[in-house]
Image: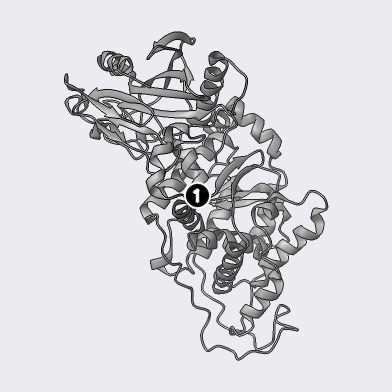
Amino acid sequence: MNRATLRCSLYLIALSLALQAWPQKPSPQKTSSQKGSQAAPVQSTGPVFPNPGKTGMSREDQHALGLQVAGQVYQQMPVLPDSSPETKYIQQLGHKLVSTIPQEYSWPFEFHVVAQKEINAFALPGGPMFVNIGTITAAANEAELAGVMGHEMAHVYMQHSAKQASKAQWTQGLAGLASGVLGATTGGMLGQLAQYGISFGAQGLMLKYSRNDESQADAVGTMILYKAGYNPQSMADFFKTLASEGGQAPPQILSDHPNPGNREHAIEKQIAGWPARNYTTDTAAFTKVRQHANGVKAYTGEEIAAGAKSGQWAQMNKQNGATFNAGGGASAAGNAVSPAGQVQAVAPSLQSVLPSQQMVAANLGPIKMSHPQNWSVTMPQQQGDYVMIAPKEGITPNGVGYGVMINAANTNGQQGSIDDFTAQLVQQLQQSNGVKPVSKAQAIGVAGVQGRSVMMESVSPFPSANNGEQAERDWLVTVPQNQALIFFVFVAPKSEFNRFQPTYEAMLKSVKF
């Protein structure tokens, strides 16, 4: 089962990230963006990309996190297929911009288009980027659109999300994170995303950047634009136009990207000493795709939020051929890709995951629980993560295929019965994880407390014998405890669940609060 959860006020926290030669005949005249700026000695070479620095999160983990979120985007937002003119164009433009970045600092960028009316774009850790239809139609020319994309790429280049995570971990202290897991309000992948400044609101994904982040993204983004042959000032022009037209309800992108102050002046000052160039402003390809984009069915943020709850976009994307292939962009669905966009692992041998007869006790803080001796306990690395008890071979980067995951949702003193909270939890798991209940909630006793039991199904992270998708049985057990809803999810492929259920029942009977 995919490692996603929620908080029991039960609002989803989720998620909120080409090759053309340079013009060979630089113009000796000043560009309009340079007029009025202070004279500066012209550099003999162009700008040099900065070292992005270090973070507490590896490149591999950043990329994996970005792919996880990208898979969720395809579940919760209308995404155009690779075959659409808009996606083809954005991919071509994106590859042109990527080619300017030094290989040692680059990322496996991939580009997608969301059928959303609002003006926005976001690039996730590790490189997946999404551009709204509304951004394509709002840009006055290709240079402005390239400016938005270059700015977003710069956030990935500077690893801003990962650096935010490092700051959060430093502030909270790693030693205290595990002890608070069972009182956490968020968990799993969604809790992890919250640590990285990523949220999923009514308007879509949002990355929470600081003004300093914005200044750095402007600085690196202008380098990308300049080296790709576009006027770096176009980035500032686009943001300035949006700000002047926003009125009382400015475009979402301005909320996600706070103005660092004197954006235009800072860019003018930065580029003043760069060698003059002939800049590309517009292309026939942009004009054509912008005209086509105006005729594409697009949705408001409110419509997208409502559609995500009903599963509308996951179904529509699949019908349109817009399914996410982790590491490969949007493509037709393949046997090795789950609906959440995660590459399935090689199935382990049954012998390697079967529980031993001997049970050992584990102290999980507020909970004590026995488990098979050959299964290990994985404590959370940060507040909100699941406690996992599973065989080593039963865990994949995409989730747990065999074992149990334990977490809690804080009810925040809300009035409600165990049935109410369980129903809301099931609903949120359906929305965030693609699971579906196959039985009604039934009463169950856990350590003398009356809880609820719900049998659910989803897609296993492990493939079937013929390398296709296989169903997974997810047994959810909820127990109220000290203004929290503690929950256990016992997991195994549907075809093998009966082999594991006696062990799961024994583990549940051993629970002590």
Q: Nearer the viewer, residue 444 or 153?
A: 444
The number of discs equals: 1
Q: Is 209 rendered above or below residue 7? A: below
Position in image of residue 421 (x %, y %)? 55, 20
In this rendering, position of residue 430 left or right of residue 119:
left
- At a point 55% along the width and 51% down the height, the residue shown is 88
Which residue was labeled with disc 1? 196
In this rendering, position of residue 250 left or right of residue 172:
right
Specify the quadrant of the image occupied by residue 479.
top left
Q: Is 296 rendered above or below residue 370? A: below
In this rendering, position of residue 301 left or right of residue 329:
right
* Colouring of the image: one colour
- At a point 48% along the width and 56% down the height, the residue shown is 167
Position in image of residue 22 (x %, y %)? 54, 76
Specify the quadrant of the image occupied by residue 93.
bottom right
Position in image of residue 261 (x %, y %)? 70, 67
Q: Secondary structure at mark 1?
A: loop
Q: Looking at numbered disc 1 in the image, what kind of residue is underneath it?
A: Tyr
Q: Is 285 rendered above or below residue 269? A: above
Specify the quadrant of the image occupied by residue 402.
top left
